[in-house]
Image (cartoon, helix red, strand yellow):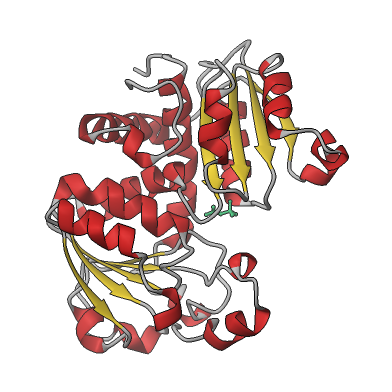
């Protein structure tokens, strides 16, 4: 991979993506390899996480490396006023690679500029979540047999949902058609619609999560309304439950349709969908382990046979 850090999905191109997916496939065949023996990975989570942090830490453990870090910034010296720059410089003395989640957009880019140690962005505010995108692409490829010419419907919080922003950008190499389903308050931001236009990507916008939209989809990508990004809780209450997928709504959908969700879910997917063979979100989260093993090894220039 021709990049030192993975901060934005735009840091990598089509060949990098396909190479990472191939490595993820190899790790799925055998995730237990001693490729990180003697290496230390720091996981710095300034925002809560279950899947991203634990799958990164599992990835390192299964590769024979060691993990340091924090899952709650209140237990770090940032709570005493230490700057992000100083924190990153200190951790760079101890670790070979830094995985960081931060509430500020641009924090991961900034971190990558103040250290010579590779930085992986594990989510920065409403901006980007590139490692989620790689596991999403791996999930799409596994379930569809291709990344090309797919109709992907994104539903819910398209304004603050960083996973949809990263996924949209990565799909530019694969001729997708997007359907954006969102209320007025949570529309896909104009910059991402401009990105579609500039890259010849077809998209339509919908307020209604209609049977026609569902029946024309290969992938439905549900998202949680990001309560933590709202400054006015009443605004959140107004929009939080507008789109919920239930099992009956999948009647007549394509055989190849799969339901994805980066998780955690709140009310976006009714539990009666969980036993439908088209529900893929728990498998999707498992794929994160293999995708993250591939990303770590690529950034550390460790060959994967
Ligand atoms: N998908 C995702 O980023 O989940 P976590 O917030 O639990 O890491």
Residue depicted at 77% across the width and 43% down the height:
73
Quarter holding the N terminus is top left
Residue depicted at 44% across the width and 61% down the height:
281
Task: Provide residue 199's location: percent of width, then percent of height.
Answer: 16, 51
Task: Provide residue 224's location: percent of width, then percent of height.
Answer: 51, 70
Q: Is residue 261 left or right of residue 42?
A: left
64 in relation to 244, above or below: above
Q: Is residue 142 visible?
A: no
11 in relation to 213, above or below: above
Quarter holding the C terminus is top left
Task: Provide residue 67's location: percent of width, then percent of height.
Answer: 68, 27
In depth, the one of 237 and 28 nearer the eye is: 237
Q: Is residue 260 visible?
A: yes
189 in relation to 125, above or below: below
Q: Is residue 115 left or right of residue 155?
A: right
187 in relation to 80, above or below: below
Residue depicted at 53% across the width and 72% down the height:
225
Q: How many numbered circles are shown?
A: 0
In depth, the one of 186 and 64 nearer the eye is: 186
* Residue located farthest toward the right when viewing the structure as drawn: 80
Q: Picture quarter containing residue 38?
A: top right
In depth, the one of 13 and 282 nearer the eye is: 13
Q: Is residue 93 left or right of residue 144?
A: right
Residue depicted at 32% across the width and 39% down the height:
10
Q: Picture quarter containing residue 186?
A: bottom left
Q: Is residue 120 left or right of residue 173?
A: right
Task: Provide residue 88's location: percent of width, then percent of height.
Answer: 67, 26
């Amino acid at each position: 991979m021709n990049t030192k850090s993975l901060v934005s999905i735009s840091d990598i191109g089509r060949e990098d993506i396909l190479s990472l997916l191939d490595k993820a496939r190899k790790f799925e065949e055998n995730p237990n390899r001693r490729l990180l023996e003697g290496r230390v990975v720091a996981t710095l989570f300034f925002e809560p996480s279950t899947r991203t942090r634990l799958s990164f830490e599992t990835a390192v453990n299964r590769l024979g490396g060691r993990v340091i870090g924090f899952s709650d910034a209140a237990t770090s010296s940032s709570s005493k006023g230490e700057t992000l720059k100083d924190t990153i410089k200190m951790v760079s003395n101890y670790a070979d690679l830094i995985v960081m989640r931060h509430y500020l957009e641009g924090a991961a880019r900034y971190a990558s500029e103040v250290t010579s140690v590779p930085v992986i962005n594990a989510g920065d505010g409403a901006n980007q979540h590139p490692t989620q995108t790689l596991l999403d692409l791996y999930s799409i490829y596994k379930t569809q047999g291709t990344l090309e010419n797919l109709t992907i419907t994104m539903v819910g919080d398209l304004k603050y949902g960083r996973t949809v922003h990263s996924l949209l950008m990565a799909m530019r190499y694969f001729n997708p058609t997007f359907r954006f389903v969102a209320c007025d308050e949570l529309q896909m931001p104009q910059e991402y619609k401009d990105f579609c236009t500039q890259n010849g990507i077809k998209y339509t916008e919908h307020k209604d999560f209609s049977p026609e939209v569902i029946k024309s989809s290969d992938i439905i990508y549900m998202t949680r309304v990001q309560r933590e990004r709202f400054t006015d809780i009443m605004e959140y209450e107004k929009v939080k439950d507008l789109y919920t997928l239930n099992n009956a709504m999948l009647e007549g959908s394509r055989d190849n349709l799969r339901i994805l969700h980066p998780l955690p879910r709140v009310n976006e997917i009714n539990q009666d969908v969980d036993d439908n063979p088209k529900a893929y979100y728990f498998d999707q989260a498992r794929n994160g382990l293999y995708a993250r093993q591939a990303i770590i090894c690529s950034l550390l220039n460790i060959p994967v046979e």
